[in-house]
Amino acid sequence: MKNAQRTLVDLILIALGCGLYGFGLVTVNIANHLAEGGITGITLLMRYWWHLDPAYGTILLNIPLIIVGYKYLGKRGLAYTVYGTLMLSGWLWLWQRLPVALPLHHDLFIAGVLAGLFGGIGSGIIYRRGGTTGGSDVIARILEKQTGIPMGRSLLVFDIFVLLASLSYLSLENMMYTLLASYVFSRIVDFTLEGAYAAKGLLIISPQSTAISAAIQQQLERGITYLNGEGGYAHDPTQVVYAVVSPTEIAAIKRIIESIDATAFVTVIDVHEALGEGFTYGKKPKKLFFN
């Protein structure tokens, strides 16, 4: 039953993500003559050159890609990709026929930021639920399997190619604001995938590790883990303390360490997501977008 409920939530959120992405594409990108990367960018090229509705272009371009790439996606991935493609196509069709317009007065800076926001939030929700909208993701996955080329590299090359081709109908100024949209898009996708909550991890090396650990547990009520280490110079065995805390607790934990061993070696690392007691268990669930 839980799997069925989770699948239902996935499908609802993927549909919502496609709706946001499609809304931004129609009311911001198309309305303000901004391009887009990937397969979506090609649909905009087809719209300009052959007056083909992007809703139909999305399906036409993705059908052969899905057929070729089905064995690389897995059953669940294939189902979610087909679903995401259909949802995006449906939303694009709908938004173009609804009298919805954003009063941007063709301010390209605001348009670039909003295009990145809508696209990034929508895509981030889709990716976080394990979905895709097909397109260049499928191409990149095939290339990675067949040639070993990392997905990130092939996606970047494909986007560059599409954006350069888009100069056939866009001015250089519009392309610069498209690049702004692409930057905002990438940052928002990362933020959405990582979640709004970020923690800090600490690695502490000190001969007073036991005392430091006890103080952290008593004063901050945070769990700690002991890792077995070895000095690189003298090869002496050492005990490394690993702890994950809230960013707001960093100053307090530094004071604790300094009061016990001012010479302790401490590194602070970013933890983009922390799951477990003290961070998720027993706390209020996150908002639906970031589940």
Image (cartoon, helix red, strand yellow):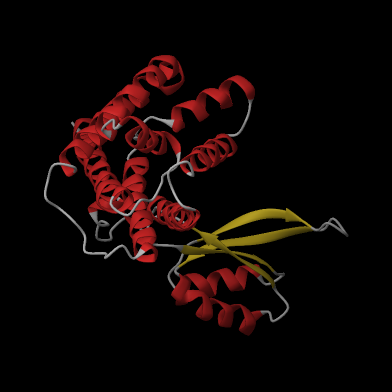
Q: Residue 111: image x %, image y %? A: 34, 60
Image quadrant of residue 132? top left
Q: Residue 148: image x %, image y %? A: 63, 26
The answer to which of 183 and 2 lies nearer the viewer is 183
For residue 159, say whether it is visible. Answer: yes
Q: Is residue 280 left or right of 102 when viewed as pictured? A: right
Residue at x 60%, y 57% (from the top left corner): 226
Q: Residue 242: image x %, image y %? A: 58, 60
The answer to which of 15 and 43 lies nearer the viewer is 43
Q: Is residue 203 left or right of 236 when viewed as pictured? A: left
Q: Residue 42: image x %, image y %? A: 41, 34
Residue at x 45%, y 56% (from the top left corner): 187
State whether residue 141 is above or below residue 30: above
Q: Is residue 158 left or right of 283 when viewed as pictured? A: right
Residue at x 26%, y 28% (from the top left corner): 56
Quadrant housing the N terminus: top left
Residue that extends furthest to the right in the rendered view of this protein: 234
